[in-house]
Image (spheres, coloured by chain):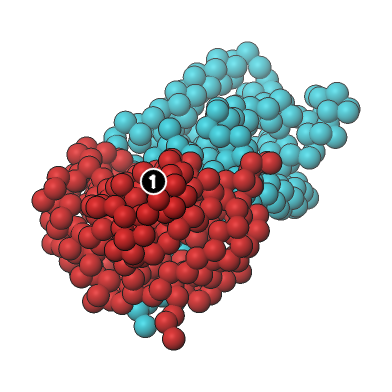
Amino acid sequence: MDRSTRTFPLSPRRIFGMVRRHFYLLRGSLPRILEMAYWPTVQMVIWGFVTQFFMGHSSWVANAAGILIGAVLLWDLLFRSQIGFSMCFLEEMWSRNLGHLFVSPLRPYELIISMMLISFLRGVVGLLPSWILAFVFFEFSIFSYGVGIVAFFSCLFVMGWGLGMAVIALVLRFGLGAESLAWVAIFAFAPISAVYYPVSTLPEWLQVVAWCTPSAYVFEGMRSVMIDGIFRQDLLVGAIFVNCVYLCLGALIFAWSFFGARQHGKLLQMGE
Amino acid sequence: MPSFAVEVSSLAKYFGHVAAIENVNFKVESGSITALLGGNGAGKTTTISILMGLLTPSKGDVYILEKNMIKDRYSILPNINFSSPYVDLPHRLTVEENLKVYAELYSISSPNERIQELANRFDIEALLGQKTGQLSAGQKTRVALAKALINHPQLLFLDEPTASLDPDTADWVRRYLQEYVAEKKATILLASHHMGEVERLCDTVLMMRDGGIVDTGSPKELLKKYGRQNMEEVFLDIARNRVQQVVTNG
């Protein structure tokens, strides 16, 4: 029997095949790589200078140098994670490739795992220049705050994937007309994620909503590490718990949407 | 007893209250080339989409390679493949990159050798380094066929397999498909508007109209039944619902 006739419930080879497909896409397009790194770098430079300015005018910022840059870098990581994930799926829709993919033995969950990996790679490629520049120009390294920060930013990646699943589910359900959601959905979370201010700044009722987002735990945790030098495990556990809920919800919405797409014949029709 | 690569019974698909296909029943013998013919909106694409598992039927049973397509989809998919003008390969990847990706998805044991073999077969060696989006329509068709054959499928669904090919290449592709079926004991179900192709290639023809199978037989049988000289005239008789009239007069 040819190997191609065997089936495995989870095949690293199929996952790798999809990662390879997006690696080829990036490798073949320098503008895409530049675009990925462009906005995080511009953001970091702007907020780096804002921080320098505030250092002389605000004791709060002076006591926690780099907190604004850290917030910007982590927020961008969340954005890159979600957009990187969503873009993988949009690429398949734009190129009218979904039909080929879903007639192949590729399982939907293998596609999801591959998109998580690609989103991680895209995030690293997009953010690495801004991390390097932050260190070179502003002597700021997010990693100097220890493993705790790394744990927190892992949570942001996972949150991006959960939201990304919901976004692509909506695009699959409502068509490419909904693709702008991929770009804007994350910004609905910005005011309640406590990126630049503590959750306590929000009205009480909104604080309840904020604690339903993994990002609020992460940014509170980041401030705790950077201002007080304390790694708060309770915030990390909270972020992980809410992330699990987001991932499950995202997967459920995607499964509902995929089921609907097979009911309505959208897998063969969708494309530009 | 002949075995069947495709067995469809009481198949129906409704979009809201509209029946795209209804009460479709047919069998495709293993090792045969069968054409699914019909005018636009007859239900060919809906039927093929259901057979490939891309569309869930509202009613009925589908057995592909003797397995239930609804329940055992993932044990069937490694053994089938398709090519259709409704789907594309990613335009920004080169031909070789696209074939490598699909070789991974189908877990092909020696992907480079298989790609080289297909490149030789379909005369696309010179195109391997080119972006797929830059190819001519005919070149894209050949690349799509190479992708469709990458996993040595036992059942191949082809929608307009020789569309955009010049007569020489189209002739060559038809000959290759016949050889492939004979050599691998594979089955092909194709949709085509090229009636000469159907006459030459197909053992059986399934004629669809208004979401149902209205006639079936070998091209020779259908020509005889409708008293026509070629399949194009038979197609027109069926598509324009002149069946009763023609058969009665005949």
> As rendered, which of A8 and B193 lies closer to the eye?
B193
The residue nearer to you, when weighing B179 against A214, is B179
- Give the percent coordinates (x, y) of residue B240: 43, 41
The image position of residue A83, as x and y in percent, is 52, 37
Rendered residue at 14%/52% (across/down): B169
Is B249 in front, or is B27? B249
Callout 1: chain: B
From the image, which quarter does the C terminus of chain B lie in?
bottom left
| Residue A170 located left or right of residue B216 | right
Q: How many marks?
A: 1
Residue drawn at 48 percent across, 41 percent down: B41
* Mark 1, other Cα within 10 Å: few <14 / some 14–19 / many ≥20: some
Determine the residue located farthest toward the front in the rendered image.
Answer: B249
Q: Could you tell me the amino acid type at mark 1?
A: Asp
**Chain B visual colour:** red
Q: Quadrant of the N terminus of chain B?
A: bottom left
In this image, A269 relative to A188: left or right? Answer: left
Q: Which residue is mark 1?
A: B237
Q: Is residue B120 above or below residue A247?
A: below
The answer to whether A8 is drawn above or below residue A87 in the figure is below
Name chain A's colour. cyan
Looking at this view, is B230 or B66 the one in front? B230
Does any portion of residue B110 appear in the rendered image?
no
Quadrant for residue A33, please give it: top left
